[in-house]
């Protein structure tokens, strides 16, 4: 897994309010996409940030996250703004013009599996002060989330695939006799 803070994700010209991390994970883009958009499964690999709702373009979701040592998570409504399978998945949350953030995952084929660019872009009146105070913590949270994703994908790769039960020859011959 490799990482960097590139600040060149497809967010346009305001790169000063963007934090991103790039990782290579040993899974196909479709497999990574499936894990990212399975909101019910987020708790098994990303317990500090949760999305709930339906994973569809323009869908409404609930975004919950934990800050520091708070016991109870903070919750906000979120809107899914990009849903291009298996390339881009993004949502926004916050209060427009005050503090709004967009979290985005961009997936690309890579010889090692999938390149995952995980980005957060802040906008609004309080975005600059927030970035000045929290850039390192936000960067660390992206790195942690991406490591959790990679670990979860490795676990999934070691689990046996559920296969349909084979039909016994007795069962098949009984069905054939009934048809006659």
Image: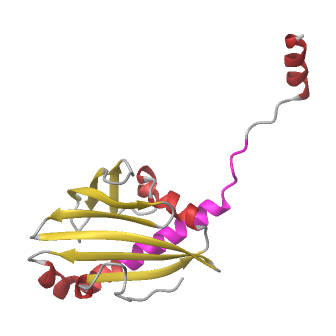
Left or right of 36: which side holds 65?
left
Residue extending farthest to the front is: 12
Q: How many marks?
A: 0
Q: Is residue 151 magenta?
A: yes
Q: Is residue 8 magenta?
A: no
The way the protein has been coloured in the rendering is: secondary structure
Residue at left offset 56%, top offset 67% = 29
Which x, y percent locates residue 40? 42, 49
Residue at left offset 19%, top offset 84% = 131
Residue stretch rendered in magenta on the structure: 142-163
Query: What secondary structure prevails in the magenta region?
Result: helix
Left or right of 145: which side holds 24?
right
Left or right of 141: which side holds 32?
right
Quarter holding residue 141: bottom left
Residue at left offset 53%, top offset 71% = 150
Left or right of 174: which side holds 88?
left
Which x, y percent locates residue 26? 61, 73
Report the front residue among 105 and 83. Answer: 83
Q: Locate the C terminus by quadrant.
A: top right
Which x, y percent locates residue 114? 57, 74
């Amino acid at each position: 897994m490799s990482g960097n803070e590139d600040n060149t994700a497809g967010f346009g010209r305001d790169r000063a309010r963007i934090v991103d991390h790039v990782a290579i994970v040993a899974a196909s883009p479709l497999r990574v996409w499936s894990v990212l958009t399975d909101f019910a499964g987020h708790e098994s690999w990303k317990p500090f940030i949760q999305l709930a709702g339906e994973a569809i373009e323009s869908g409404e979701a609930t975004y919950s996250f934990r800050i520091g040592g708070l016991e109870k998570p903070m919750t906000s409504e979120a809107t899914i703004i990009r849903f291009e399978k298996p390339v881009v998945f993004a949502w926004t949350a916050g209060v427009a013009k005050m503090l709004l953030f967009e979290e985005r995952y961009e997936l690309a084929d890579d010889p090692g599996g999938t390149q995952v660019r995980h980005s957060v872009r802040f906008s609004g009146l309080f975005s600059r002060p927030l970035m000045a105070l929290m850039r390192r913590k936000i960067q660390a949270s992206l790195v942690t989330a991406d490591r959790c994703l990679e670990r979860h994908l490795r676990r999934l790769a070691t689990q046996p695939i559920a296969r349909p039960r084979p039909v016994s020859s007795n069962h098949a011959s009984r069905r054939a006799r009934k048809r006659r």
